[in-house]
Image (cartoon, rainbow, N blue to C red):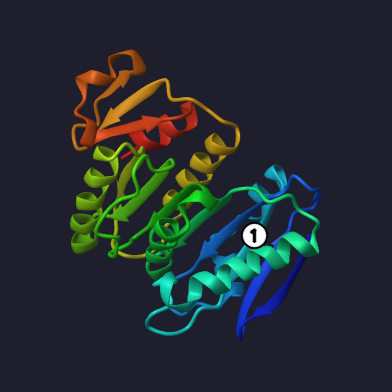
Amino acid sequence: MFAGNIQIGGIEFAYRAPSKINANSRIMVLFGGRNWDGEKTLKTFNFEDFADKYNLVLVSPSFKNNEYWQPEKWSGIVLKEAIAKLESMFNLKRRKLFFYGYSAGGQCVNLFYNYMPESVEAWALHACGVYPPIAVENGVPALITCGLNDSERIRISRAFIYKYRERGGQVIWKQYKGGHELNKEALEIAKAFFKSCIENKRANFVGEDDSMRIVPISSVDDIDTEFRNYLYSEEIKKLWEEI
């Protein structure tokens, strides 16, 4: 493991390279809660073992002000420069990114994806309350989770999810007990989700919001488009079914 920091435009980025790294290693950007340091985010999310297994370089920005989740203002350019710096440092091929974030970091995830959709392979977030007004057309696979008591963020998230699905994107929606806090269950299903994306899994089952009904992919038309959860693996299916 190698961990360190780089400075881009006055912003510190904490990063961690996998135990084995090569030109095909991918980059995963982790966005923490509001004004978190990058090192705190890496420690809290605890993606190290996952990153070692899938040769992921983890990087997390220490963004700190009230506008950093709006990438078009300044933070988008800084993130792109940080990614380019890491690609150069580790002699990486330019490949699409993975995004994961919590709370204000969840805002970063979907707003940065909206800003640079051509550069992102898949994204996931927990407890987010800000989304773009128009979803990307034919969006990449996504996962959105939220605590049941985080009622306003549930309402806002669900409104966006319907738009994302109706415009051709696939997003898994999962609610958990509790409020706004980041929980281990959300992190567990996020890892399973990214695993399925990296391994190019194809959904054999589709689940329905609210009813939690699951049908084989051959019966996908039995569930309305805006309520469909494409379950890419048996692991995701099991975690999605859990109460």
Asked if 227 appears above or below 104 in the picture, the reply is: above
Q: Residues within 10 Å of mark 1 (few under 14, many from 20)?
A: many
Q: Is residue 43 visible?
A: no
Q: Quadrant of residue 37?
A: bottom right
Residue at position x 42%, y 51% from top?
A: 186
Asked if 156 appears above or below 197 in the picture, the reply is: below
- In depth, the one of 94 and 227 nearer the eye is 94
* Residue bearing mark 1: 58
Locate residue 30 relative to residue 51 in the image: left or right.
left
Asked if 69 appears above or below 115 in the picture, the reply is: below
Locate residue 239 relative to residue 86 in the image: left or right.
left
Q: Quadrant of residue 152?
A: bottom left
- Type of amino acid at the residue the image marks with label 1: Leu
Residue at position x 19%, y 60% from top?
A: 151
Q: Secondary structure at mark 1?
A: strand
Locate residue 10 relative to residue 226 in the image: left or right.
right
- In depth, the one of 194 and 177 nearer the eye is 194
